[in-house]
Amino acid sequence: MNSLLNTGRPPVFCPGCSHERITKALDKALSNMGLSGENVVIVSDIGCSGLFDTFFNTHAFHGIHGRALTYAAGIKMAKPDLNVIVTMGDGGLGIGGAHLLAACRRNLNLTLLILNNFNFGMTGGQFSVTTPPEAQVGSGFLNRLEKPLDVCDIARSAGAPYVARCSSYSGDLPDEIEKAVRFDGFSIIDIWGICPGRYTKRNKLTPQIIDESLAGLSSCSGIVEENKRIEYGHNYREISSKLKKVAPPGGIRAEFIFPESDRQEVMILGSAGQRIITSGDILCIAGITAGLNVTQKNDYNITVLRGPSISEIILSPDDIGYSGIEKPSVIIALAQEGVDRRRYVFSDLDESTLIIKAAGVDIPESRATMLNVDFKTRGIKSQDWALVSLAILAKIKKVINVDMLNASLKLVFRETVLESALELVKRVEI
Amino acid sequence: MSLSLLEGNEAVAWGAMTSGCRFFAGYPITPATTIFNTLLRIMPPAGGICLQGEDEIASMGYCLGASMAGLKSMTATSGPGISLYSEQISFAIGSEIPLVIVNVQRLGPSTGSATRGADGDINFMRWGNSGGLPVIVLAPVDIKDCFVLTMHAFNLAEEFRCPVFLASNKEIAMTKESIDLDAVEKPRIIDRIQSKEENFLPFAVKEGSMIPEFLPIGGKTLVRQTSSTHGADGYITTDPGIISRFQNRLKNKLESAIDSFSFHASFIEENAETLIITYGVTGRAAKVVIDEQKKAGKPLSLLILKTLWPVPENLIRDKAKNAKNVFVFEMNMGQYVCEIERILPDKKVKFFGRMDGRLITPRQIMEAISNE
Ligand code: SF4
C-alpha cells in the first residue's frame, strides 16, 4: 500500500532518535490498513513528538502542550469517521494529566501514542513524570525526589479499554499500532524509546535494557476486559437521537388588563424552602399575561437549601430600563434572613409602598403602609406564604389581579399542584 | 405580541442555536452555567453536541477541534475560567479558529463573588492573550442583546475567523426578562467561506482579502492546523517577512473592519454639553437618567457601546464631536475609560466606577454628573 509519509518533509530527529522508528511504524500501520491521508488526522502535542504531524500527508492539528487529547476529542465528535491519532511525549502526559484521565473515562475512539523517552528532549532533558529517580537529567537533583508513574496502570484504573506497552525497537510495533487504531474505543500505547540528543548522553539506555525493563512490568497487551464498553461517540449519538426536539420558547398571549398605570417594583424577602423564586416566576408570568414587560432577579446563597431567598420583580407597561429596585411598590417580608439582606431599602420608603409582613418578622422602621398577616394562625404552611401574599395583592388589585394570577398559575403548575394552588388563592380573604 | 420569560443566558443559548451553533463545551461555573444547562437540553436533540469538559482548558480544546472540523462552536465561562482559557484563546487568534466565547462576568479578582455582577474583565478579554493581537468583544445591555449579539458574534467569528467574546454580566445573564423572540430582528447568518481552490493552502489569502478561506479537517482535501508561527501552507516558518505580514494581517483584518461592526445605541442631543459613554447593564441606568433630564429640560447625550474591541474609534469621535465633557461609567475601577481618554484627548473625560456587586444606579450617575 501507499506510504503516507510526506517525502518533502523527512523526519528531522537527532540521529538514533527512536521517534524516527515510531514515525515509520505509524506509516506502516496506516498503509497496512489501506487508509489514505484524508481518512486520518494526526494531532500532535509539544516537544519532539510534536513534529509528527509534519512528516505525514494526512490532516494535521498541532496545538498547545498537554492539550492534544482535547483537540482530538472535538475533532472526533465532529467527524466520527475520521481516524484520530494523537502523538504525545512523556512531557505532555504530565502537563495534560487531567485530559488523559478524562479520555480514559470517556472512551472516545482515539488512539494515543505515548512517545515515552523519560525526559523533555526539546527543552534540555528536564525530568518528566516517567523519569527514573536514579537518572541524571537536566533538573539537577529534583527527579531524585519524585516517584515516576506508570501510565499503563493509570490508564487501566481510569477506565481505558485498550492499553498496550512496547518498545520502539519491537518488530511488532506497526502491528501494535494497527491493532490500537482498529480498536473501537480509546486506545493507548506506551512506547518506550531512546533520546540520544539528551537522555543517553548521561544515562545508559539500550534497546536491550528497555526489553529487560518491560519484561519486569505487568504485561499490557491491548484489550482491558474489565473496561470494555460501548464507545462514547456511538453512545452519545444513540442517546441524542432518541431525545425529543425542544421548540424555541413560545410566547404567552396578553389577555388581561394591568390594574396599575405605571412601573411596579416588588420585593419578596424570604428564606430557602419558602418557594420565593417560584413565586417570583408566578408574578412575572402574571405580568406577561397582561402584556407587561418584566424583569426578575433572584438572590440566594450558593448552598441553596439554607439562608435567605429573595426575588425582585419589576412589571411595567414601558420598556424596563434600569433593572434595579429603587422604590418598591410592594415588599413581601416573609423571613428575617431575607429582610436582613435588604435592610437598606426600608428607610427611604413612604406610604405608597405596601409591606405585607408575616407575623414575627422584624423589619426596620419605615413610613410604608403595613399589612400584618398571621399565616400560622390562618393555618397556612410556610412554603405557601409567598403565593398567599400574591393572592392578597391580586384581591386588592395591587400590581396584579386575580385573572392574571390564575392564568399564571395555569402556566406554571400542572395537575394536583395547580388545583391546590388555585384553591389556595380562592380561599384567601382580605 | 407574545412575550416569553427567559434568563439572559437562555437567550444566549437560543441565539447560538439560531446562528447554527452545533458544538458547545464548557465547565460549570456560576453565573455562566445556565448556558450549558440550556444547550444540553436543546442542542443534542437537534443533532448538535454539548460536552462538559474536565476543566476549562479542555472545554476550549474541544471547541477548537470541533470548529476546525467545521462546526460552529461556543463555550461559556466567567472570569476564573477566562484565566484558564487564555492559552487556547491565543491559539484561536493566531491560528484563525472561529469561536464564540461567552464571558458572564462576575465580581473579581480571582474566585471573587460568584453571584455578584461586574464588568471587571473588559481589558482582560482584550489583552489576556500572548502576543497581544486583537480580538472582538461585544457587550449586551439586555436580554434582546443577549440573543442578537450572540448571533452577531457567530457571524463575526465566521467572517473574520477569530474568537469573539460576548462580554455578558451576571446582572444580565441571570436576570429573567420578558422578550418577544419572534419580533426580534435577527441578522442574516454568515458562514465561513469554503475554499474551492484546487491547491488549497490553509492560511493563504486571496488578493484583496485578509481572511483565509476555510476547509474542514476531515474533508477530502488535507488541512493543516498549527499553533506555531506558520506560513500559508500551515508549516512552521522562520522567515521574518512572512511572519511580519502574517502578524500585520491578524491585526489589520479586525481593526480595519471595525466600522462595519461598531454596534451601539446612541441618544445624541444637539445642545448637550455632556456625553455619557458606557456599556453593558450600566447603559440601562444611563438611559433612565438622560430621559429624566430631557424631561427636565437639561438634555444629556448618551453613547452605549456594544462593540468594545477593537475600539470603535470613528464612532466614538463622531458621537463626541459636539460634547465638551465626557463621562464614562463602568462596573469596574476604570478600564475602558483609558481608551476614551486616548481617543478624545481634547475633551474633559471623567470617570465613575462601582465594584461592590451592585448596579450603578441612575441616582449615582446623576450625582456624579451634577458634582462636576
Ligand atoms: S532531543 Fe531526543 S527526542 Fe528530541 S529529536 Fe533529539 S533524540 Fe529525539
Image: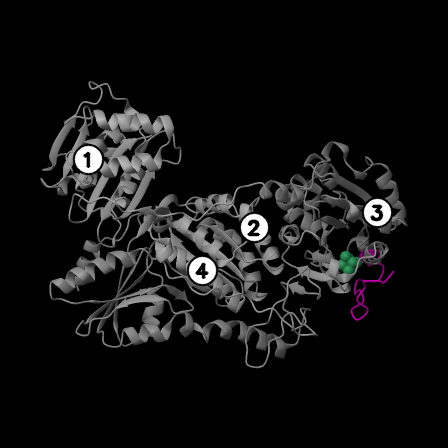
Foreground: disc 1 or disc 2: 1
Residue at left 57%, top 66%?
Answer: B96
Q: Is mark 1 within 8 Å of ligand 1?
A: no
Residues at badges 1 and 3 in contact (C-beta under 8 Å)? no
Residue, disc 1:
A394
The structure residue drawn at horizontal position 21% and vertical position 51%, both measured from the top left corner, is A317
The kind of residue tagged 3 is Glu
Q: Is residue A363 visible?
A: no
Image position, residue B211 (x, y; %): 56, 73
Q: Residue at label 2?
A: B48
Q: Which mark is residue B151?
A: 4
Q: State which region is magenta.
A: A1-21
Q: Which mark is residue A176?
A: 3
Task: Please state the quadrant of the image where ligand 1 appears.
Answer: bottom right
Q: What amino acid is found at the position of numbered circle 1 in the picture?
A: Ala
| Marks 1 and 3, the one that precedes in the sequence | 3
- Nearest to viewer (mark 2 / mark 3): 2
Give, as a three-letter code, the residue at label 4.
Met
